Image (cartoon, rainbow, N blue to C red):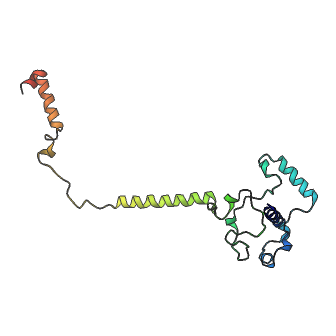
C-alpha cells in the first residue's frame, strides 16, 4: 500500500516538474521559447480569459481552465529534426489541443487546397474524361463482321412475328370471328 502511495506521489510530482529541472537532453531539443509554454503571468490577462471562457456558450463546461487553443492541425507544421517527438511534430510539455485525436498527424489528411480550386480541378478532370469519351464515340470503327441474317424474312413466322398476327386478324374479319378459327 505504501509503495502504491509513493508511486502516485512520484507521478504527481513528475507532472509538476518545471522545465528548468529537466535533463539537458530534453532541454536542448526545444524549438519554441519557454515563455510560450508557460502559463500567463499577469493576473489581468488570466482573469479576463477566464471571464470570457465562462461567457462563451460554445466552450465545453467540463474543460474548466484548460486553454482554448486554435484549431490548427499538426500536419500543417513544418518538419524539423529539433522536435522532441519528430513523428507527431510536438515538443515535450506542449499543451495538447482538446481535440488532439482530430488534430494530430494521424488524423485524416488536412485539405491544402481551397474548395474553389478543388472544384475547378474536378471540373477539368470531368471535362477531360467527357472529351475522351466523345472522341472515342466519334472515331469508332466500322463493325468487322456482317450482321447476322436469317432466312424467310428473319424467321418472323417461326418466331410469331407481325405477319402471323396480321394474317389471323384479316381472317377473323373475313370469316366473322370464331367460325373462321374453327374451320382451320
Residue 94 rendering spot, x and y as whole percentages: 78, 66
In the image, is 129 to the left or to the right of 100? Answer: left
In the image, is 110 to the left or to the right of 33? Answer: left
Residue 1 rendering spot, x and y as whole percentages: 79, 60
Residue 12, picture quadrant: bottom right
Q: How many marks?
A: 0
Between 54 and 180, the one lying in front of the other is: 54
Residue 38 rendering spot, x and y as whole percentages: 85, 65
Q: In percent of the image, x 66 and y 65: which residue is there?
A: 105
Rendered view: 155 above or below 6: above
In the image, is 171 to the left or to the right of 103? Answer: left
Q: In percent of the image, x 87 and y 52: which residue is there?
A: 50
Residue 134, picture quadrant: bottom left
Q: In percent of the image, x 70 and y 68: which residue is there?
A: 77
Between 57 and 147, the one lying in front of the other is: 57
Residue 21 rendering spot, x and y as whole percentages: 85, 73
In the image, is 154 to the left or to the right of 44? Answer: left
Residue 86, picture quadrant: bottom right
Residue furthest out toward the right: 43
Rendered view: 36 above or below 67: below
Q: In percent of the image, x 77 and y 76: which residue is there?
A: 29
Rendered view: 112 above or below 50: below
Residue furthest out toward the left: 183
Q: Quadrant of the C terminus?
A: top left
Amino acid at each position: 500500500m505504501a509503495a502504491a502511495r509513493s508511486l502516485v506521489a512520484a507521478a504527481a510530482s513528475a507532472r509538476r516538474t518545471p522545465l528548468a529541472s529537466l535533463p539537458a537532453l530534453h532541454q536542448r531539443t526545444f524549438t519554441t521559447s519557454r515563455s510560450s509554454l508557460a502559463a500567463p503571468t499577469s493576473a489581468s490577462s488570466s482573469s479576463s480569459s477566464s471571464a470570457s471562457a465562462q461567457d462563451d456558450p460554445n466552450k465545453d463546461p467540463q474543460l474548466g481552465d484548460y486553454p482554448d487553443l486554435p484549431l490548427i492541425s499538426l500536419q500543417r507544421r513544418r518538419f524539423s529534426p529539433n522536435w522532441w517527438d519528430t513523428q507527431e511534430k510536438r515538443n515535450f510539455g506542449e499543451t495538447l489541443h482538446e481535440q488532439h485525436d482530430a488534430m494530430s498527424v494521424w488524423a485524416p489528411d488536412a485539405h491544402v487546397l481551397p474548395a474553389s480550386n478543388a472544384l475547378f480541378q474536378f471540373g477539368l478532370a470531368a471535362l477531360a474524361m467527357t472529351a475522351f469519351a466523345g472522341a472515342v464515340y466519334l472515331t469508332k470503327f466500322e463493325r468487322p463482321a456482317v450482321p447476322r441474317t436469317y432466312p424467310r424474312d428473319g424467321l418472323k413466322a417461326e418466331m410469331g412475328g407481325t405477319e402471323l398476327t396480321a394474317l389471323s386478324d384479316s381472317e377473323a374479319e373475313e370469316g366473322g370471328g370464331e367460325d373462321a378459327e374453327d374451320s382451320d
